[in-house]
Image (tube, rainbow, N blue to C red):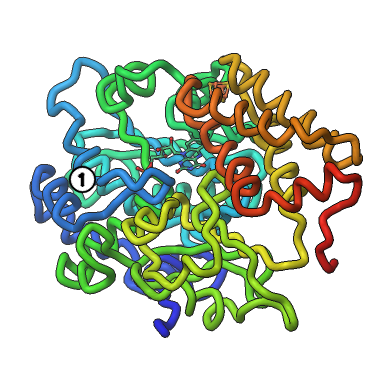
């Protein structure tokens, strides 16, 4: 079993600049400013770092899309909106290690030729907001941010609080919200790299993605690639919740055994319980069954098993849970968070939620099961943004794998789970 690491995570939750400097904080600037911007982009590309926000898009490639010359200012935007059920890893960095995030954003600014960064943080993360504001102030006071970083480069950061909408984690909705508009997804293309914040070329990356960059700069490519396997490199944060005895955020090398992570690192299931299913990457990813988790915990292995590592938020579901109610609760979340821009999401999720309420109250009909599957079919691929696609897997998968529980609800009783 791999032991938890402490590189992205601070040893304690007091993120003062003094402590950070004592741990070697801001040392990456020495490496950063020795390189040309292009060399930094190349290094990030060669490292194979993949975005930690959900889609796993290669970070170096994203940075390389930013045009060298631009009539409008370029921007670095940190997506700290972390709102998907089960996902709570970025909060650890925001509250416990904000200077690492600042250091990573400066590296990105230098690499793409931007002088202004924004941290867009979800409204509910008030402690994280205060710590980021404080960290930005401290960094400015010591010259780690500002007009003349290392006498070479100007970069500053504004910390902006969202109002607590899951859709504002979608990168273009985030940009609209940051501009003061209602947070709704934009039509793509143009992608943010071409026309992003205030119509300038913009990199939007996840908190953990930025925080990974200083570690790469300080420790080098060989160190970074010593964790994981090709296409799946690096130390990584995993949030684990649900029915395990030691839930929390763990930093582990990519590619450790998924099964060991649940049963050893996270303490296994409560006594006497058996595993029913696992959601491996946040509530929008497909269920894995117990027989499917004897695999490495990385992007490609989870994809091969039929799901996605997503935001690396693992939700463990034991036999005390009713799968119909699990799907109902998550559907309520997605319906509530629908921004209302497109009909299949706005109306479809509302209709699905009504069906679940029927099933819950014993008023369900046999035709509800095919109706739910049909509604899922009509949503997938037919909406303006991926929010609604993400609502479907839990509905579809619980019907396919746990149909008898739906039938029990229709027969007028809750499924016969031991509670
Ligand atoms: C509905 C929805 C919510 C999202 N929420 C987040 C989020 O909270 N944090 C995040 O980093 N990415 C989120 N994303 C993904 C972003 O759109 C974007 O891909 C990501 O910020 C890019 O960063 P990365 O390349 O570092 O992963 C969300 C996407 C969707 C469709
Ligand atoms: S899929 Fe849902 S969240 Fe996305 S644009 Fe359409 S209504 Fe809004």
- Residue 4, compared with residue 334, is above or below; it is below
Q: Residue at x 77, y 48 (%)?
A: 325
Q: Nearer the viewer, residue 154 or 215?
A: 215
- Residue 111, compared with residue 322, is above or below; it is above
- Residue 277, compared with residue 60, is above or below; it is below
- Left or right of residue 93, residue 203 in this image: left
Q: Position of residue 55 (x, y in %)?
A: 38, 43
Q: Residue at x 74, y 44 (%)?
A: 329
Task: Please say whether residue 413 is visible from this viewpoint.
Answer: yes
Q: Position of residue 303 (x, y in %)?
A: 37, 53
Mark 1 is surrounded, within 10 Å at the Cα level, by few (under 14), some (14 to 19) or many (20 or more) other residues, namely many
- Left or right of residue 346, residue 379 in this image: left
Q: How many labels were placed on the picture?
A: 1
Q: Nearer the viewer, residue 99 or 175?
A: 175
Question: In the figure, residue 157 lies in which quadrant?
Answer: top left
Q: Residue at x 25, y 17 (%)?
A: 72
Q: Position of residue 50 (x, y in %)?
A: 30, 51
Q: Which residue is mark 1?
A: 60
Ligand 1 contact, mark 1 (Cβ < 8 Å)? no
Q: Residue at x 52, y 59 (%)?
A: 288
Rendered-image quadrant of the C terminus: bottom right
Rendered-image quadrant of the N terminus: bottom left
Q: Nearer the viewer, residue 220 or 323?
A: 323
Task: Please say whether residue 130 is visible from this viewpoint.
Answer: no
Q: Position of residue 212 (x, y in %)?
A: 33, 58
- Left or right of residue 31, residue 301 in this image: right
Q: Secondary structure at mark 1?
A: helix
The image quadrant in which ligand 2 is located: top right
């Amino acid at each position: 079993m791999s032991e938890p690491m402490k590189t992205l995570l601070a040893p304690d939750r007091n993120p003062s600049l003094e402590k950070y400097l004592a741990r070697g904080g801001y040392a990456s600037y020495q490496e950063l400013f020795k390189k040309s911007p292009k060399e930094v982009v190349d290094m990030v590309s060669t490292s194979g770092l993949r975005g930690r926000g959900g889609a796993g898009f290669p970070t170096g490639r994203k940075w390389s899309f930013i045009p060298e010359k631009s009539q409008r200012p370029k921007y670095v935007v940190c997506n700290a909106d972390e709102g998907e059920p089960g996902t709570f890893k970025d909060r650890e960095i925001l509250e416990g290690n904000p200077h690492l995030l600042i250091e990573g954003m400066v590296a990105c600014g230098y690499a793409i030729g931007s002088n202004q960064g924004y941290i867009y943080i979800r409204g509910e993360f008030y402690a994280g907001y205060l710590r980021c504001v404080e960290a930005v102030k401290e960094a400015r006071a010591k010259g780690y941010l500002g007009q003349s970083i290392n006498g070479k480069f100007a970069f500053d950061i504004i910390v902006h609080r969202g109002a607590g909408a899951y859709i504002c984690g979608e990168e273009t909705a985030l940009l609209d919200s940051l501009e003061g508009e209602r947070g709704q997804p934009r039509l793509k293309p143009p992608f943010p790299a071409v026309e992003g914040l205030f119509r300038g070329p913009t990199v939007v990356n996840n908190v953990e993605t930025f925080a990974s960059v200083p570690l790469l700069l300080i420790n080098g490519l060989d160190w970074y690639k010593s964790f994981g396997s090709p296409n799946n490199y690096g130390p990584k944060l995993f949030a684990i919740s649900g029915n395990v005895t030691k839930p929390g955020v763990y930093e582990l090398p990519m590619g450790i055994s998924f099964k060991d992570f649940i049963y050893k690192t996270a303490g296994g299931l409560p006594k006497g319980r058996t595993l029913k299913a696992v959601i491996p990457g946040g509530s929008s990813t497909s269920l894995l069954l117990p027989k499917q988790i004897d695999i490495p915990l990385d992007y490609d292995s989870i994809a091969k098993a039929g799901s996605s590592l997503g935001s690396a938020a693992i939700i463990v579901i034991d036999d005390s849970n009713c799968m119909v109610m699990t799907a109902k609760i998550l559907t309520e979340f997605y319906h509530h968070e629908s921004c209302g821009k497109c009909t299949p999401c706005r109306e479809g999720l509302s209709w699905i939620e009504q069906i679940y309420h029927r099933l819950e109250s014993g008023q369900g009909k046999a035709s509800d099961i095919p109706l739910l599957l049909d509604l899922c079919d009509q949503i997938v691929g037919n909406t303006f943004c991926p929010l609604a696609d993400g609502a479907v897997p839990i509905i579809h998968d619980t019907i396919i794998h746990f149909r008898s529980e739906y039938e029990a609800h229709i027969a007028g009783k809750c499924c016969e789970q031991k509670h």
